[in-house]
Image (spheres, rainbow, N blue to C red):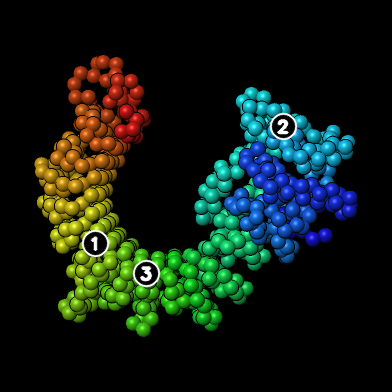
């Protein structure tokens, strides 16, 4: 008989099929009449969905929509090629008596006021079958209605039933649909598990009904999946936008590329694809991938995010990948290019898409400064530029005669593991009058002051500044802070600061509107200087001190900071010296010398535990 994958009926007896169809029609009618909505009827949701599958009917419950609006792709006929990716459990076999017992069990588990006339009729018909009635484990009324009675304290009927009958539904089957969907959402967000949707839909009939009703669970398509499974994902995704992942070569399998069938699916669904990730280790495979698409001349009209990620150890070597034709992506807004040298990004006749709002360049080499400026010049709407592990190369002519460019819309600049010379080149050749946020992490060079001081001076309207692992000579930090008078957010991490570096910030309100201050892994700073900063900047609403030497944290300073700032977080590592500042003989001030296990700022609860101490204002 006709069926959809996932559930099948062992019997072909016309009497069983007729009775099961009648039960399904009654349950569907109750749902369509809005008589069986809510958590009390979760078990019946699963019953109805499994009946639809085993009977080959085109209806299945979708918790994301009303009955009259739903159209579940998962219940449509689907032709498999053997099995579900070699999963022998792909088809769940049901005998009619098991289905009858399940239906009767769920109806008898309802509270009396929840039982509809149709449900009473079903119960009467099934109770007349001795093999069914004798096999049912009765549900007793609990404090909570319906199926939720399985969660009552003490004598939980569902748990007792599971103990008596191993085939009975697990207590997790009584979780509310909304909670289970939330759990499924987090499981789906874990990108490393591309088969999670199939896995969840094979746990139980209840899990299956919820999984098939979540179209968003089936939207991530990876071409490493077999063609039948990809088609199944796309069908069950309904009209949701898709995320497509393509592998272009792996270690030891450099020739691995999408098949023509995969590419045909990609092009067929091109209007629905919102994001695409192409990843691999072989630059030549990326070139072949772009060539295969070029033969088909696609248009991805809805694509807004594209990642081209080459994780090759030969970056900067002799193997370069050619970029795709950018005209294929007329709506592209977010682009990440990794492992491509600058001469492979495009050309003056084929520039990067002008629709870009965010551009990330990483681990590509060499990147010639002239080609970088040419590429950026056409991106009039770019708001975020991120450069990570980029080796900028300068020619003599570029250093002398290259004119700069202006990027009016650029609001955020992020650079990581870039040479000081490269940062200086960006600052001197790219005019960004509306830049609001600057992030510099792990710069390559001894003294960043020669790059950051003129940069902050040229951008006095900076709102956010993050500096990580940044070394500056004497007076460098003071100059940077004095240039950044409009900051709201300041974060400094692992930059070997001392109290003198923040003295300018502590003595006067040189950044009068600062609201957020983060100082992480600064082992030489003390809370004394932070208290002075807090006193001179009354608009602070958040202070985070993480990864500090505990010997530099004073209880008295911390009390003042916590009193003046709404949100305070202090994490310290190491042994405690006498932070109490006086006689520690009292019980509440008796600190262990090997661990920070002392009193709270209040007199009752401890605020430090073990060798990592965490303090939040909300715990006072």
Look at the numbered disc 2 and give the secondary structure of its residue.
helix
Dot 1 and dot 3 residues touching (CB under 8 Å): no
Say which residue label 1 marks: 435
The residue depicted at 32 percent of the width and 34 percent of the height is 616
144 on left or right of 344 = right
Say which residue label 2 marks: 112
Say which residue label 3 marks: 356
**Badge nearest the viewer, 1 or 2:** 2
Q: Position of residue 336 (x, y in %)?
A: 40, 66
Q: Position of residue 231 (x, y in %)?
A: 64, 65
Tell me, yes or no, if residue 460 can be seen here.
yes
The quarter of the rendered structure image containing the C terminus is: top left
3 on left or right of 277 = right
Q: Residues within 10 Å of mark 2 (few under 14, many from 20)?
A: few
**Badge nearest the viewer, 2 or 3:** 2
Tell me, yes or no, if residue 450 can be seen here.
no
Quarter residue 520 falls in: top left
Q: Position of residue 538 (x, y in %)?
A: 18, 40
Q: In this picture, is 287 found above or below 198?
A: below
Look at the numbered disc 3 and give the secondary structure of its residue.
loop
Q: CA distance from mark 2 to mark 3?
A: 60 Å
């Amino acid at each position: 008989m006709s069926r959809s994958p996932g559930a099948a009926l062992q019997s072909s007896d016309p009497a069983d099929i007729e009775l099961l169809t009648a039960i399904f029609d009654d349950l569907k009618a109750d749902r369509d009449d809005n008589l069986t909505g809510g958590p009390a009827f979760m078990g019946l949701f699963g019953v109805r969905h499994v009946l639809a599958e085993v009977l080959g009917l085109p209806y299945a419950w979708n918790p994301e929509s009303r009955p009259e609006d739903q159209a579940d792709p998962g219940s449509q006929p689907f032709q498999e090629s053997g099995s579900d990716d070699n999963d022998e459990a792909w088809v769940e076999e049901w005998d009619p008596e098991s289905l009858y017992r399940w239906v009767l069990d769920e109806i008898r588990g309802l509270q009396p006021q929840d039982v509809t006339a149709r449900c009473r009729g079903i119960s009467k018909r099934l109770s007349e079958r001795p093999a069914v009635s004798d096999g049912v484990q009765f549900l007793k009324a609990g404090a909570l209605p319906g199926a939720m009675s399985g969660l009552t304290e003490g004598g939980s009927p569902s748990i007792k039933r599971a103990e008596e009958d191993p085939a009975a539904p697990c207590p997790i089957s009584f979780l509310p649909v909304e909670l289970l969907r939330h759990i499924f959402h987090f499981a789906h967000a874990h990108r490393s598990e591309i088969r999670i949707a199939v896995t969840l839909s094979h746990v139980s009939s209840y899990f299956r009904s919820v999984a098939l009703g979540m179209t968003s669970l089936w939207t991530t398509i990876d071409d490493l999946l077999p063609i039948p499974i990809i088609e199944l994902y796309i069908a069950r995704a309904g009209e949701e936008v898709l995320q497509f992942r393509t592998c272009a070569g792996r270690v030891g399998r450099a020739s691995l590329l999408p098949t023509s069938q995969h590419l045909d699916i990609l092009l067929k669904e091109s209007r629905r694809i919102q994001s695409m990730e192409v990843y691999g280790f072989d630059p030549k495979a990326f070139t072949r991938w772009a060539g295969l698409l070029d033969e088909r001349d696609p248009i991805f009209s809805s694509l807004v995010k594209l990642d081209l990620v080459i994780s090759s150890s030969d970056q900067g070597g002799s193997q370069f990948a050619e970029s795709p034709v950018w005209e294929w992506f007329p709506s592209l807004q977010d682009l990440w290019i990794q492992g491509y040298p600058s001469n492979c990004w495009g050309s003056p006749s084929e520039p990067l898409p002008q629709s870009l709002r965010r551009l990330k360049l990483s681990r590509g080499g060499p990147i010639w400064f002239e080609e970088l400026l040419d590429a950026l010049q056409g991106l009039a709407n770019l708001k975020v530029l991120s450069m990570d592990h980029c080796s900028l190369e300068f020619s003599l002519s570029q250093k002398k005669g290259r004119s700069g460019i202006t990027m009016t819309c650029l609001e955020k600049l992020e650079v990581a593991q870039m040479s000081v010379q490269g940062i200086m080149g960006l600052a001197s050749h790219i005019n960004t009058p509306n830049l609001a946020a600057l992030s510099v992490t792990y710069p390559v060079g001894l003294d960043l002051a020669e790059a950051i001081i003129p940069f902050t001076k040229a951008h006095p309207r900076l709102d956010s500044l993050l500096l990580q692992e940044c070394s500056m000579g004497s007076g460098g930090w003071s100059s940077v802070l004095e240039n950044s008078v409009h900051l709201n957010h300041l974060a400094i991490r692992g930059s070997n600061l001392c109290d003198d570096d923040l003295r300018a910030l502590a003595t006067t309100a040189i950044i009068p509107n600062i609201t957020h201050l983060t100082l992480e892994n600064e082992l030489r700073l003390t809370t004394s200087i932070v208290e002075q900063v807090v006193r001179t900047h009354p608009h602070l609403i958040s202070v985070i001190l993480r990864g500090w030497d505990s010997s530099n944290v004073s209880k008295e300073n911390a009390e003042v900071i916590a009193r003046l700032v709404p949100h305070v977080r202090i994490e310290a590592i190491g042994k405690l010296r006498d932070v109490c500042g006086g006689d520690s003989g009292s019980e509440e001030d008796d600190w262990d010398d090997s661990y920070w296990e002392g009193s709270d700022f209040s007199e009752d609860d401890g605020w430090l535990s073990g060798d990592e101490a965490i303090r939040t204002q909300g715990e006072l």
